[in-house]
Amino acid sequence: MDEINSLMHGFAVALTPFNLMLMMIGVVLGVIIGVLPGLGGANGVAILLPLTFSMSPTSGIIMLSCIYWGALFGGAITSILFNIPGEPWSVATTFDGFPLAQKGRAGAALTAAFTSSFFGALVAVLLITFLSPMVARFALKFGGPEFFAVYLLTFCAFIGMSKGNPMKTLAAMMLGFAFAAVGMDGVSGTLRMTFGTEVLIKGFDFLIAVIGLFGIGEILQTLEEGLEFKGIQAKIDKRVVLDTWKELPKYWVTSLRSAAVGCFMGIVPGGATPASFMSYGIAQRMSKNGSKFGSDDDPQIEGVVAPETAAHAAGTSALLPMMTLGVPGSPTAAVLLGALLIWGLQPGPLLFVEQKDFVWGLIASMYLGNIAGLIVVLTCVPFFAAILRIPFSIIAPVVLVICAIGAYTVHNSLFDVYMMVLFGVIGYVFKKLDYPLAPLVLAIVLGDRAEESFRQAMLASQGDMRILFSNGLVGGLTSVALLLLFWPLLALGLKKLRGGGKGKPATSGA
Amino acid sequence: MELVVAGIIFAVGALVIYDSIRLGNRWGDDGPQAGYFPFYVGSLLCISSLYTFIRSVMNRLLAEESFVTRGQLKLVLFVLLPTIVYVAVIEQTGIYVASIVFIAWFMRVLGKYSWLKSVLIPVVLMVAFFATFEFWFKVPLPKGPLEAWLHLN
């Protein structure tokens, strides 16, 4: 039981007063970020990242990951009370959450959402605790070709599992790679795609891209909906919490299933958003009361439990491949990966050997951070809901100012702020046209590393693509990657084979 | 709009291919040249955007959904244009002064607040920001003539 020992050591690292304070600050900031339109997990962490430069990496990651947990919790508040998903992964929560709130059961819906979020996270953290050392040990054997195969798998999974048009996913992803390639080539030192300009030598920083794409882009999109938020008042008292807790064990099957769906989607880089929809869809089909899901007359608590559990499980387990393989499973995990790189830590299997304090401190903080998160959100809902009652004409410019400050502090460069606005426009247009943003961000983060491992592999084989099938491990990874890549076509073929078959039941409304 | 964006992506792809060929997209003496990987990236960009382009041209015959309504566009530009002006003047005025004016403008024009509130709230906010960043976290932000005059930098 090495893991238990390591975890206990991790608790010792995380349980200093300073780290506990950072944890609380992180969670509260995270919930605020989750509630505010235009600020989400990914860009919230990106904006606050420069503030952690002066801390030790362990304290820094504790604070940043707690911001992430807070944001995951916070998304549910706006969904249930305002029918506005604060985060993309809480869209499915609005289906039943908002009708429940309209029926005066806002407290119950919120309690259910928070508790199941917590449950989902707990399952995912347990998974991380016991699975990640194994994955890391396994991955120590990886060389260039294997890493490239893992990257290939990540990106193929995006294309194969995306809900929308795979060609748009591909375009967004390749655009990310192109952005990543700009600047100095890490291997040969030549300048690429700078076209003689000096500002482009450093290349595009993905933090700037994240702040622009998710922050500015989202503000612009929110504006279209108008300037007013109309919410429902909610208070959570002890009785409502206890009553809801008594009701929740009834849904243990849904919870477990949703947690499993979430963990799977988080590790395979599907992300929290598809996980929440998928889990909602499955719960709707499997539940006795499935037909009442999302109805205005009799909305179901179960319909809040399913997406929330899955979203939080996926969001948490997305950190597993980030730590063990250096492949983030979600945009926010990508930002955390970028943070590791900035602190001079190399994410990947070696992290578990060389940075034991850091890794286990982080894992221990996941337990503590989620407990802290649950307590904070259960006690402070009215306060967080009040934030959304601040008129948009104040919130919007303040968020824009915060984004600008965040972009500036990454490199103390004003050019970055201009780039941020440009990325904001790209983000807005892409969202309108259904180009997915997550693969774009992941490609910017991983572009250089993917290319490097690709070139290492090619170097080793003297340009022979067959190296990607040279042994069982790399061959298997590549095969799975290709399978996922062509999954949409295969699925289409299968459906045709079945003779058009039964109509697919509607799973989600978005 | 769909067509325009696909066209732009295609152009970016073409640009990437062009630059990759300049750098050498083949096998050098010491392994793959700098343009080897980007060449494929550019090619895929072109292919995928071409697909989207052709598809939307074909769909266009069926139905054309409008990208934004006039009212929405007005609102978006109402925010986007001041934002561009805002980041453009940061260099001259410093970020604090620019932010105060920016937030005040929003509150006054979009929020229809009284002049007093529109000035007071951003000033208080920015003083708080100043304290947080400059004193607490020791992160210096761009400053302009006002801060110089107040001996704050």
Image: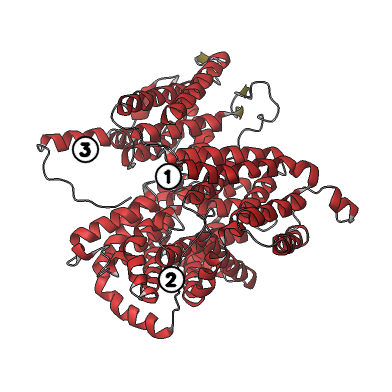
Is any atom of residue A441 visible in this view? Answer: no
* Residue at x 37% of width, y 40% of height: A158
Q: Are discs 2 and 3 both within one chain?
A: yes
- The subunit carrying tag 3 is A
Q: Seen in the image, is A409 located left or right of residue A322?
A: right
Q: Earlier in the sequence, mark 1 or mark 2?
A: 1
* Residue at x 42% of width, y 41% of height: A436
Is any atom of residue A233 visible in this view? Answer: yes
Foreground pick, A189 / A312: A312
Instruction: Please state the horizontal and vertical placement of residue A243, each as a whole percent of the image.
Output: 33, 82
Q: Quadrant of residue A291?
A: bottom left
Q: Amino acid at mark 2?
A: Ile
Q: Amino acid at mark 1?
A: Ala
Q: Residues within 10 Å of mark 3 (few under 14, many from 20)?
A: few
Picture mark count: 3
Q: Which residue is mark 2?
A: A232
